[in-house]
Image (tube, rainbow, N blue to C red):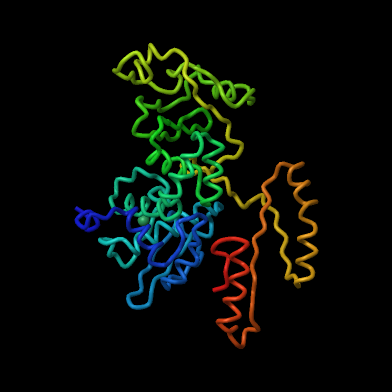
Amino acid sequence: MSIYKIHGITPEGHAIELLRELSIPLVPTINLQQICAKKNIQISYRPLESAAALLLSMPGSGAKILLNSNNKYCTRDNFSIAHELGHYHLPGHHQAQYKCDIREIFRFNSSDDKEREANRYAAELLMPEPWLKLRIKMADVTLPLIISIAEDCQTSLTATAIKITRICPDRVGIAYSEDGVIKWTAKTKSFPYELRKGLVNERSSINEFIITGCLSGDLRQIHPSAWVDSPYQGSHDWPCELSSAQLVNFNEYKVEYGGDTGDDTGRESRANILTAQAVLEPAQLQDLADLIPQLLIIKAKANLPFKFIVNIEVGDGEEKPSEETVQEINMLLKGVKENFNLQ
Ligand SMILES: [Zn+2]
């Protein structure tokens, strides 16, 4: 039995404990760089063969997390950092080095206890349950909601969907297919059926997409046997035996973007993202702010994600800005976004 279980604290409990210890609000996006800086953990990138990440503990002087520079997905990097923080923080994870295989980090059913614990820790750190419960309480769990939560948390669709199914009280089953093959499924405790594995059923409207390349709508009403295969031995009310279920609403969505393996739906490929960088004086930044309405029109017209990643540098490199100045600036920045502060 792991030490955390003896103490009655789960990996999720340890993740929340870390956020509270560092006075980090349990509201995504969780700033992992801030956590690593406070814990004296350096992050760097190297080409790593099969590993997604490495944790090197340096007794008395923190640790190093090495991320695979060949990885194209920033949501994977986030999850890898949080996973390695799990190895660093969880009781019973005492190895001086963890070399975490890409298949272990992004598969949530790893046969290795420590890898599973680090994944649970990572999912909680990035998607704190108290916040997530409130988020899903306010709306039906649909793919647009999962995408929106994944964007807030900077997590992959896979990690987000799996985390949601672990805490959602509603009957939700999720199946992810790629090229006609169901790659993974997840369901809530209250979902009464087993989801199909293997090839996508020909009755599914997703099959129409596989054959024709088109899907003429988002929501379909289909027979449940297209997606589930074990009958529920219950009453004739829903949930009921499959033969009595007749037509049930199943949300079938075509996801426009693809992952590289299907295990992690990497929406955030950097390959085709164009960026513009410049050092702006305050007046030029004001000019940029004035352009935002026009940029938003272009964004809407092209239907493209649009993001501003702001990096503010204060100081001349010789003398550290005074505490008072930093506090004054941070008070203003906090008004723009929580956790947006100089450090
Ligand atoms: Zn690991």
Of the 4 image quadrants, the one containing the C terminus is bottom right
Which corner quadrant of the image does residue 282 belong to? bottom right
Q: Percent position (x, y) of residue 90?
A: 31, 60
Residue at image position (45%, 59%) is: 81
- Residue 279 as seen in the image, left or right of residue 165: right
- Residue 172 as seen in the image, left or right of residue 272: left
- Residue 260 as seen in the image, left or right of residue 96: right
Q: How many marks?
A: 0
Q: Nearer the viewer, residue 43 or 172?
A: 172
- Residue 53 as seen in the image, left or right of residue 253: left
Q: As drawn, which residue projects farthest toward the bottom? A: 318
Residue 156 sits above or below residue 238 on the image: below
Q: Percent position (x, y) of residue 287?
A: 80, 64
Residue at image position (75%, 70%) is: 280
Q: Percent position (x, y) of residue 319?
A: 60, 88
| Ligand number 1: quarter of image | bottom left
Q: Percent position (x, y) of residue 238?
A: 38, 19
Q: Nearer the viewer, residue 120 or 72?
A: 120
Q: Nearer the viewer, residue 331 or 56?
A: 331
Residue at image position (79%, 70%) is: 283
Residue at image position (57%, 25%) is: 219
Residue 212 sits above or below residue 52 on the image: above
